[in-house]
Amino acid sequence: MTQIHKNLIAGEWLTGEGEIENVNPSDLSDIIGLFAQADADQLEATLDQARVAQQAWATYGIERKQAVLNAIGTELMARADELGTLLSREEGKPFAEGRGEVYRAGQFFTYYAAECLRQLGENAESVRPGVEVDVRREPVGVVAVISPWNFPTATASWKIAPALCYGNAVVWKPANITPASAVALTEIISRQDIPKGLFSLVMGSGRSIGQRLVENPKVNAISFTGSVPVGKSIAAAAIGNLTKVQMEMGSKNALAVMDDADLDLAVTLALGGAFGGSGQKCTASSRLVVHAAIHDAFVDKLVAGARAMKVGHALEDGVQMGPVVSQQQLDENLTYVDLGKSEGAELVCGGARLELNKQGYYMSPGVFLNTSNDMRINREEMFAPLASVIKADGYEHALSIVNDTQFGLTSGIVTTSLARASHFRRHAQSGCVMVNLPTAGTDYHVPFGGRGDSSYGPREQGKAAAEFYTTVKTAYIAAGDAV
Ligand code: NDP
């Protein structure tokens, strides 16, 4: 009998209103398990208990909190092979990426473990003589974390770790398509020295339990990563309760390749940026803006590289690109392929469904040529293993194309010119800028986030996370002169 994986409700592992089946996108005959769907009463119960637990957690002291976060991070890193295998099995990214994600998630916890000990406040002289001012940060309270399937462990961890570090309770609604990684992380957190109910897992669909969670006035802050339409609906729900909200959403990142670029490096960055994680990354570079002088040479190597990529089962040795995550995602991707062609783009390779020895959601990496930046394939986030090449007349033209988007998460340039690199760093309209590096791949100790429709609210990661997960208190103390 297939095991039913439960939710963590007010500190207890419970079944809910039915279950969903979790299927391996690399092999549809592989059922990973059944995952309980939390119901409305369970959500209320866990939110109530979270409030109580948060008050207890706030009194724990910074060393005890540090030990908890450190233990979670250390265990994630130690079990990166095992949990990375599980992640790749349910999400479809190659094992090296799955393992790397779990290890990175561990690093988020150990980083924020250290931050528990570094929560320094500020003090100042008042403008009034004899009065001192003390400024410090306090927890916001109960934080709802809503995470996507493309980085099921890392994205959740870069929200959960700072939330706990800064003294909050967490109620986590993971993506329903990758629940196994969520249960595994919850199981680790649940074994720590934390107050009962400080951390909850409420699996279920976004439209039911997700919607109830974001509308609930018992939630003090919502951190969300996912699509723009869902982000907008969450923001609308949050404002109804004046709930604090932080959102990372879509993107349409560009990599500019200059005529002075190291061509092999440029092709490596373009292939990784467009097809890593099957193109399902918010930091993917699906727009390749290429200087006309090297366009043809670049395209030859890019297409050869895309054709040579090994697509297959995420856990098979040597596989460079796994399946896409679901039938729905595959259908949408193929619709974008048709759309690109109908817009006049030339599909020179890939972009087709692949039938392999295992039945899964496989698709070949596709490259569009002769595209313009006003085509929908260059304006909408496709989340697909599809890259579009846009020819630019020169550096200034390339920069204007890079910036011509409603999004602004990352952007990159490949160049050997220091002048162009530094001009680009200053003028690219995105939250993260990469020089001779892939647009995907960021650190954990510095801020992460974008502009335009890519992000809303304070930055995530590094010390910047304190802005969202805390509220500032300014205390005035009349010191008096008497001793
Ligand atoms: P969604 O935005 O629908 O889902 C993201 C998370 O939000 C999931 O946990 C989802 O739950 C939850 N959710 C959905 N609806 C609601 C709601 N009304 N209230 C509260 N929570 C909700 O993304 P999809 O998974 O459907 O992906 C669709 C597209 O979004 C992708 O093709 C891609 O373009 C973009 N996307 C971008 C990401 C990024 O990193 N920038 C990440 C993921 C997606 P559930 O899983 O149950 O639906």
Image (cartoon, rainbow, N blue to C red):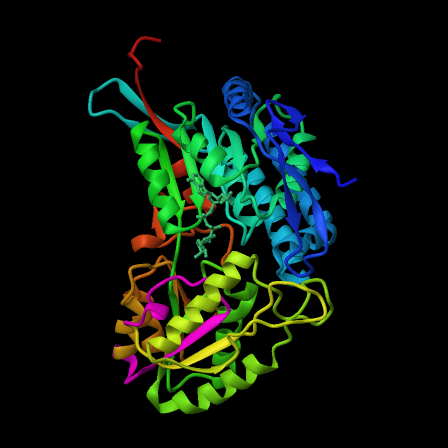
- Image quadrant occupied by the N terminus: top right
Front residue of 298/467: it is 298
Tell me: residue 254, above or below residue 248: below
Of the 4 image quadrants, the one containing the C terminus is top left
Rendering coords of residue 94 (x, y %): 65, 63
Q: Residue furthest right?
A: 1
Asked whether, in this view, residue 93 is left or right of residue 474, the answer is right
Rendered residue at 25%/17% (across/down): 130
Residue 14 quadrant: top right
Is residue 391 one of those drawn in magenta?
Answer: yes
Q: Is residue 441 visible?
A: no
In the shown orientation, is residue 296 left or right of residue 50?
left
* Residue depicted at x 39% and y 88%: 295
Residue at image x 42%, y 83%? 261
Q: Which residues are magenta?
A: 374-396
* Above or below for 172 versus 377: above
> Is 326 placed above or below 254 here?
above
**Residue 482 screen position, x and y as percent:** 31, 8
Q: What residue sits 51% from the left and 84% below the top?
A: 303
Q: Is residue 22 magenta?
A: no
